[in-house]
Amino acid sequence: MNISSAYSTEYRVRKVLSLTFKYLILIILAIFFLFPIIFMLISSLKVDEAQVVSDMSSLRAFLPVGDIGLQNFRDVFANLEFGQLMFNSVLVMLTTVLFGLMVNSMLAYALARLRFKGRELILSVIVALIIIPFEAVAIPLLLVVNKLPWFGGATTWLDSYHVQIIPFIADAFSIFLFYQFFISFPKDLEEAALVDGASLFRIFRSIVLPLSKPIFATVAILQALASWNRFMWPLMVTRGPDHRPLTVGIQSFFGQDPRIWGDLLAFASMITIPVLIVFLLFQKWFVQSVARTGIKG
């Protein structure tokens, strides 16, 4: 009995030590990944530019000390068309995500359920497109959109919203994620609906979509992040603030002499905060979908 009790006590001690060690590692990693965001948010609230620069080399950069206020944020709105840039980013992101979810999900469902000649070839091409970086096709794509007509007599897509949206609606990685989810989706309900005379589109709309919220949330987050953070392509195809997103607008602060770090960090904070809010809102579905689609491995 004493031996059993001693063993049980030793087991509990080991378990507590193991959990303590794991949580300590997780806390250290969380601090490591969070400290740039904390530095950005705290520094954006420091009104004195000299203080912002001097605090960068010490731990004071992570502390709300000195003259604190929202003047840097007001300077961003005063010196730049931030509202227009924000509208451009949100419009491009929402449109790309909404149309992307519709197109990519329907294409993936067709590949997962239909059997037709060339299906394997299409899947191979989709996997190959995931590997090819966008930078490899950016210049050819630029030459193509420069000569494409548009409504109203326009002879080019440059400096517009649709040039930032249409090329990114169909996304190979999003199609692959949807495909992986749909091939593991149980077919019993679909087969019962087919027997009752429902069309494939009706089955997809009424049965598959309501049960696929986690994967839709995951793809929406990934496409939203990709669209929100896109820099090179908008820089290549836009010429002014009328259509440029926030990521391109921020470069105007890097061209200032002297460079005002307080305003720059305030601008960066206003770009980062919406992304964090979106992720926190969809975090539950995102984690569920990661577990079900096997993205982790």
Image: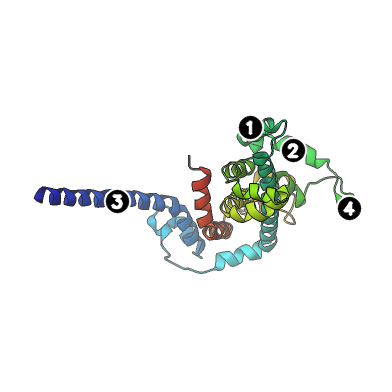
Earlier along the polypeptide chain: callout 1 or callout 2? 1
Mark yes or no: residue 59 visible: yes
Camera-nearest label, 1 or 2: 1
Q: Which mark is residue 152?
A: 4
Secondary structure of residue under mark 1: helix
Can you name the residue that lies furthest to the right here? 153
- Residue 32, placed above or below residue 126: below
| Residue farthest toward the front in the current orientation of the protein | 195
From the image, tell me which residue sits under label 3. 19
Mark 4 / mark 1, whichever is N-terminal: 1
Between discs 2 and 4, the one toward the N terminus: 2
Closer to the camera in the image, 50 or 284: 284
Q: Amino acid at mark 2?
A: Leu
Q: Residue 119 placed where, x, y %? A: 69, 33
The answer for how far apart the CA atoms under marks 3 and 4 are is 65 Å
Residue ID for mark 1: 128
Q: What's the residue at 66%, 52% (across, down)?
A: 97
> Which numbered disc, 3 or 4, marks the residue that appears first in the sequence?
3
Residue 115 appears in which quarter of the rendering?
A: top right
